[in-house]
Image: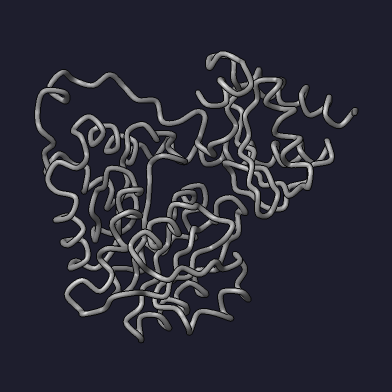
């Protein structure tokens, strides 16, 4: 956002930020007691219990955001098993940090299109398959039965299926967390997107115990701050808010898709939290919207844009006005 403000000249506070895919009306964080700031994090504060109840598994490890696991997992591949370089398939387009982390650790990374047929064509040549599910930014979804079959094929050869479920909370029936723990199955979850708590930096990894122990040792003690643990526990236990917000987001996602279609930008995919539009004019459209202080995320391959949700009616009005100006030209 600050880079956009410098590039296009609008003050940070004037922007409508649609670039992130984060719930713009996240869980309402209550005031925290003073001791949350003065005590070291405590493992028996209720976070793990709240997470196990919400996700449907206690085979978990809290993380300072799922990014911590994304960066650490490549170094843990084969630890203690004598394995070195892995052949890793990562969805493209997809969240770039996965490919970057595995490449930085010396593994052979192969880009795979986010389609079942493309994955089937390469799966038996891979040691690790990394999926973002639903995919970011395309919104591609896979049937849980398909994911279970891919995992079984990888696990028979000692391989891993790593599933980043950062955007699955709006449709939790797609999650593989309840399937575990299973050898070779690693699932990442985050409170950043659906709960809108990106700044708290809280995530979880669901994996067999040995891998969780190795990851915990690498992260060290007190990896998640006490205030973040308290906020996360409250959000995970607030089932009323979760149910209501899930329904609201479904409607907001449909509203965004309809608005984009009405202005000649029919989405090619998306989730309740964002819509993805392929367009050869992606750079021009991003620039035109930025001149109106509206920031969207642009991707180069393929040329495309990701639109997140406005957080209020004023934001929806600003987006519609800017899209109308675009389509009128």
Q: Quadrant of the C terminus?
A: top right
Q: 89 or 224: which is nearer to us?
A: 89
x and y percentages locating residue 6 in the rendered image? 56, 20
User: Residue at the location (56% across, 40% down)?
Assistant: 247
x and y percentages locating residue 266 in the rendered image? 78, 46
Say left or right for 131 vs 75: right
Where is 293 relative to 298, above or below?
Answer: above
User: Residue at the location (41% across, 39% down)?
Assistant: 192
Where is 142 relative to 158, above or below?
Answer: above
User: Residue at the location (12% across, 45% down)?
Assistant: 221
Say left or right for 215 vs 317: left
User: Residue at the location (68% across, 54% down)?
Assistant: 302
Q: 260 or 242: which is nearer to us?
A: 260
Say left or right for 49 vs 123: left
How many marks are shown on the rendered structure?
0
Q: 19 or 31: which is nearer to us?
A: 19
x and y percentages locating residue 3 in the rendered image? 52, 26
The structure's colour scheme is one colour
Residue positioned most to the right: 329
């Amino acid at each position: 956002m600050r880079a956009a403000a410098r590039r296009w000249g609008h003050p940070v506070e004037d922007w409508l930020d649609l670039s992130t895919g984060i719930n713009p009306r996240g869980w309402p964080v209550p005031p925290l007691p003073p001791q949350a700031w003065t005590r070291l994090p405590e493992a028996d504060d209720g976070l793990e219990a709240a997470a196990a109840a919400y996700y449907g598994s206690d085979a978990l490890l809290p993380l300072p955001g799922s990014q911590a696991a994304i960066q650490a997992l490549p170094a843990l591949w084969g630890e203690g098993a004598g394995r070195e370089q892995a052949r890793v398939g990562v969805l493209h387009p997809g969240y770039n940090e996965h490919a970057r982390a595995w490449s930085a650790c010396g593994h052979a990374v192969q880009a795979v299109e986010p389609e079942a047929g493309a994955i089937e064509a390469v799966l038996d040549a891979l040691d690790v398959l990394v999926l973002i599910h639903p995919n970011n930014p395309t919104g591609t979804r896979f049937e849980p039965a398909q994911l279970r079959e891919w995992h079984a094929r990888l696990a028979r050869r000692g391989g891993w299926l790593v599933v980043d479920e950062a955007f699955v909370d709006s449709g939790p029936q797609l999650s593989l967390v309840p399937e575990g723990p299973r050898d070779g199955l690693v699932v990442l979850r985050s409170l950043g997107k659906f709960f809108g708590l990106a700044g708290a930096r809280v995530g979880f990894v669901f994996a067999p115990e040995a891998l969780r122990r190795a990851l915990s040792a690498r992260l060290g003690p007190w990896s998640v701050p006490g205030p973040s643990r308290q906020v996360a526990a409250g959000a995970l236990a607030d089932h009323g808010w979760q149910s209501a917000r899930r329904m609201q987001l479904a409607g907001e996602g449909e509203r965004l898709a309809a608005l984009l279609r009405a202005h000649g930008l029919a989405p090619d995919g998306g989730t309740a939290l964002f819509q993805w539009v392929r367009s050869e004019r992606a750079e021009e459209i991003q620039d035109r919207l930025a001149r109106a202080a509206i920031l969207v995320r642009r991707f180069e391959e393929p040329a495309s844009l990701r639109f997140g949700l406005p957080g209020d009616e004023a934001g929806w009005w600003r987006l519609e006005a800017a899209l109308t100006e675009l389509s009128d030209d």
